[in-house]
Structure formats: C-alpha cells, structure tokens
C-alpha cells in the first residue's frame, strides 16, 4: 500500500517537473533575448538545449512506467516565470535587468533542484534504478547551472551596484515605450 501511494506521488511529481521543463523551453528564449550580457545570453541559450534534454529524459521515464507525461500544469514554475516576465516588462536599466534575470533563473534552478532531489529519492525507494540514473544526471546539471549563475552574478551584480543611472541621466526613459527608447538610442 505504501509503495502504491509513493508511486502515485512519484508519477505526479514527475508530471509536475515535465510541465516545468516545457514551460522553461518557452521562457528561456525570452530571457535570453532580454539579457544585455552576452555571457548571460549564451548561458540561457545553452540551458535551453539542456532543458529540452531534461524533458526528453522525463519522457523516457514515463514510457518505462507506462504513464502519460501530460495532464498537469506546474503552478510553481508558472509563478516563477510570471515574476520574471513582470521584471522584464518593468524595463529596468541594463545592469539591473541582468541581475534580476540571474535572480529569476536561480529561483528556477533551486525549484528544479528541490523537485529532482525529491523524485530521485522516490525512484531509489521504488527501485526505479534506470529512472534514478536519468534523474540524478538532470539534478547534477541543474546544480551546475546554478553554480554558473552564481559565478556570473559575481560580475553582473557588481556592475548593477556600481551603476548610478538616475532618471535624469536617462531622461526618465523607463517611462517611455520600448520603441521610443530604441529610437532615442
């Protein structure tokens, strides 16, 4: 009985992660486009390819379980992505934008690390050794991405802290539509 309940939870959590990964496949290109740092943009583009692989690994696990991958929306990831979109829409100064994008990305990574850590523990208890190997591979990649973001933040956050871009210096350009700012540049 306990195994059946744990297996049900395991499958539900896998569906949640599958939804989260697919939401990220749509969000990461927007984050890359918004970033002003070439290194950050390249990091988002690299993680997009990795995220596609994470979703493919989950599909393999669902196939082995004889379960459907769909049918659940990860509300946690949707909320994190929405917060990032709101921050981008506020159109902060470039240094602040990149620092905010890193903050958003690290929250996403921590959410995924927690999720993959849990399903890895469930897979181990359930004897799902093949799935466990795939889940641990993804977990390790998520941790590595978080480390890379931390390294990038060391430089980008300092740039944001050192910038003294006032409303007067920008002519209060944050209140202008994006096209008008682009024309002004």
Image: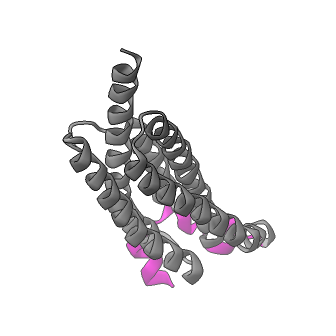
- Up the image or down, 152 lies above or below 63; here it is below
In the shown orientation, is residue 26 left or right of residue 140?
A: left
The range drawn in magenta is: 163-185
Q: Is residue 156 magenta?
A: no
Query: Residue 95: image x %, image y %?
Result: 65, 71
Q: Answer left or right for 84 relative to 100.
A: left
Which one is nearer the viewer's eye here, 134 or 93?
134
Q: Nearer the viewer, residue 45 or 97?
A: 45
- Image quadrant of residue 68? top left
Image check: 180 left or right of 101?
Answer: left
Q: Is residue 149 above or below residue 15?
A: below
Q: Which secondary structure dominates the residues rendered in magenta?
A: helix
Question: Residue 171: within the magenta?
Answer: yes
Return the x and y of residue 104 as percentages of the image width and height: 56, 54
Which residue is drawn at the image coordinates 21% and 37% (left, top)? 71
Tell me if residue 26 comes above or below residue 117 in the rendering. below
Residue occupying the point 42% across, 74% down: 180
Specify the quadrant of the image occupied by residue 89: bottom left
Q: How many numbered discs sit on the rendered protein?
A: 0
Q: Residue at x 58, y 65 (%)?
A: 145
- Relative to 10, does residue 156 appear above or below in the rendering? below
Please state the horizontal and vertical placement of residue 171, each as a whole percent of the image: 61, 71
Name the residue at 19% across, 41% down. Answer: 66
- Can you give x and y, in whole percent of width and height, for residue 152 in the image? 68, 72
């Amino acid at each position: 009985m306990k195994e059946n309940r744990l297996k049900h939870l395991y499958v539900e959590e896998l569906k949640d992660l599958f939804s989260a990964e697919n939401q990220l496949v749509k969000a990461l290109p927007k984050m890359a486009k918004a970033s002003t740092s070439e290194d950050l943009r390249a990091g988002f583009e690299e993680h997009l390819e990795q995220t596609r692989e994470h979703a493919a690994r989950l599909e393999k696990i669902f196939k082995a379980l004889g379960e459907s991958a769909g049918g659940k929306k990860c509300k946690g990831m949707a909320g994190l992505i929405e917060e990032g979109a709101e921050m981008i829409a506020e159109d902060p100064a470039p240094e602040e934008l990149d620092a905010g994008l890193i903050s958003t990305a690290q929250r996403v990574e921590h959410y995924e690390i927690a999720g993959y850590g849990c399903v890895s523990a469930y897979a181990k208890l359930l004897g799902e050794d093949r799935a466990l190997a795939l889940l641990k591979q993804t977990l390790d990649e998520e941790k590595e991405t978080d480390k890379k973001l931390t390294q990038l933040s060391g430089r980008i956050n300092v740039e944001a802290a050192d910038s003294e871009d006032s409303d007067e210096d920008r002519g209060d350009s944050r209140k202008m539509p994006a096209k008008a700012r682009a024309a002004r540049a």
